[in-house]
């Protein structure tokens, strides 16, 4: 039995509409440049699937996994858990993330990938939390800015559960 409830925050039709807008922005910005779209695992895969189906500009796709956590505490150091297979030197790179929360892991990932000399690194996120961050992490494309709540669904999980929900919801204790 769950000791929490999930409340709907963003429904499927709203998700689809905003993801299409993000795809149009990427098409406009990358026309003719064949960027590398790297999906940050695990949560980014559902957003990325819908996003790339809406992008008409040619691109290469890859996956990257990164962590800066030991248990529930950030170590401040990045560990690449799944590296890119596609070379990014001289290419535009778009990192696709489910949510930018503290942003620390993504910030460190960008720093680590910068040494591979991409033309640019941009971030596309489904969700961005409205919080202050102690570092500059521009999120170039995002579908929704949300309050500081713990969210699940559409790829986001709570203890590896609820990723498959067709909407984004937030968790509240019962």
Image (cartoon, rainbow, N blue to C red):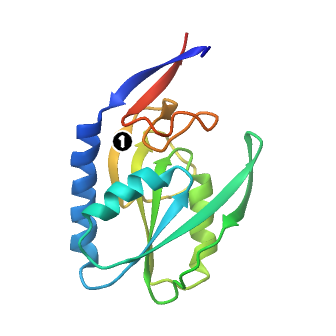
Give how far across and how far down residue 62 sits, in percent: 50, 72
Q: Quadrant of residue 27?
A: bottom left
Q: Residue at x 62, y 56 (%)?
A: 105
Give how far across and how far down residue 129 sits, in percent: 45, 40
Query: Compared with residue 112, is residue 147 higher up or lower down, i.e. above or below?
Result: above
Q: Quadrant of residue 110?
A: bottom right
Give how far across and how far down residue 141 sits, in percent: 34, 58
Q: Describe residue 27's horizontal placement relative to residue 156 as left or right.
A: left
The residue beneath circle 1 is 145
Give the quarter of the figure containing the C terminus: top right
Query: Compared with residue 133, is residue 120 higher up or lower down, i.e. above or below?
Result: below
Give how far across and how far down residue 103 sits, in percent: 55, 51
Most extreme residue toward the top, as rendered? 174
Q: Provide the secondary structure element on which disc 1 rests.
A: strand
Query: Compared with residue 64, is residue 103 higher up or lower down, i.e. above or below?
Result: above
Q: Residue at x 49, y 48 (%)?
A: 100
């Amino acid at each position: 039995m769950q000791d929490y409830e999930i409340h709907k925050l963003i429904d499927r039709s709203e998700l689809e509409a905003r993801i299409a807008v993000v795809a149009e922005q990427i098409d406009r910005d990358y026309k003719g440049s064949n960027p590398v779209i790297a999906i940050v695992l695990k949560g980014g895969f559902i957003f990325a699937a819908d996003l790339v189906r809406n992008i008409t500009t040619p691109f290469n796709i890859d996956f990257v996994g990164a962590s800066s956590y030991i248990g529930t505490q950030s170590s401040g150091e990045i560990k690449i858990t799944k590296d890119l297979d596609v070379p990014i030197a001289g290419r535009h790179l778009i990192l696709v993330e489910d949510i930018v929360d503290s942003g620390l892991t993504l910030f460190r990932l960008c720093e680590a990938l910068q040494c591979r000399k991409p033309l640019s690194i941009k971030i596309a996120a489904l969700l961005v939390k409205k919080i202050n961050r102690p570092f500059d992490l521009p999120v170039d494309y995002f579908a929704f800015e949300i309050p500081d709540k713990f969210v699940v669904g559409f790829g986001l999980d709570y203890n590896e559960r609820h990723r498959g929900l067709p909407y984004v919801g937030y968790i509240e204790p019962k």
